[in-house]
Amino acid sequence: MGFEQTISELRSNGVRLTPQRQWILRYLKDTHIHPTAEQVHQEVSKALGGISLATVYNTLHTLTKLGVIRELSYGDGSSRFDGNETEHAHLVCENCGVVGDVDAPDISNIVPESIVKLGFNVHSYRLEYYGLCKDCQVSGHQHQTRTIEN
């Protein structure tokens, strides 16, 4: 769902849409880099100079709770945020930490029969592929931070 459609749905559900919420949501809907809260703060501060990091964290928490963005937690203790709320998988480079979106199989094709037999109703999933991105393979695993763009 795009930014405008998400805003419309939130408004119809009575959600208060402050300028901060709108800027953060627009940034996450427009980017594919899966930023941290600090990166969101850095980018949104360019438009809203007075926005605090605490406001960014609170807004990210609210938008996650509303189901319009996803929080992705990794073993390093950081969280990244994804504006694409549809079901998809992620590629995660174990060297530079880049996270990218990839298409994933329909959930009906990936739920193991053992889960079905237990009567468990799966409504979402989180599928991630770990390895090395092309740049880290070429560079001999030198540590760098970058993003995968579709």
Image: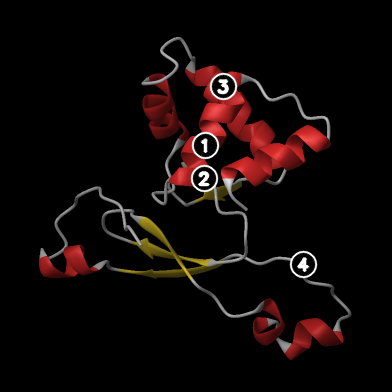
Residue at the spot 53% in from the left edge and 25% down from the top edge: 56
Which circle, 4 or 3, is nearer the viewer?
A: 3
Q: Provide the residue designation for mark 2.
A: 29
The image quarter containing residue 139 is bottom left
Quote the CA–CA distance across marks 4 and 3: 30 Å
Label 3 Cα crowd, 10 Å radius (few <14 / some 14-19 / many 20+): some
Counting residues from the start of the chain, the first of labels 2 and 3 encountered is 3
In the displayed structure, 127 sits above or below 108; it is above
Residue 140: give x, y in percent of width and height.
11, 66
Rendered position, 58 above or below 84 = above
Amino acid at pointer 3: Gln
Camera-near label (2 vs 4) is 2
**Local secondary structure at mark 2:** helix
Q: Earlier in the sequence, mark 2 or mark 4?
A: 2
Q: Residues within 10 Å of mark 4 (few under 14, many from 20)?
A: few
Name which residue lies at 83% across and 30% down.
14
Side (left or right) of 21 relative to 9: left
Residue 26 shows which numbered tag?
1
Earlier residue among tags 4 and 1? 1
Dot 1, crowdedness within 10 Å: few (<14), some or many (≥20)?
some
Residue 26 can be seen in this image: yes
For badge 4, the amino acid type reads His
The kind of secondary structure element at disc 3 is helix
For residue 104, side relative to residue 12 (left or right): left
Front-lying residue, 7 or 90: 7
The residue identified by callout 4 is 123
* Residue position marked by numbered label 3 in the rendering: 20
Q: Nearer the viewer, residue 130 or 134?
A: 134
Give me the C-alpha separation between circle 2 and circle 4: 22 Å
| Distance (Cα) linking label 2 and label 1 | 5 Å
> Do the residues under discs 2 and 1 have CB atoms within 8 angstroms?
yes
Q: Residue at x 84, y 75 (%)?
A: 120
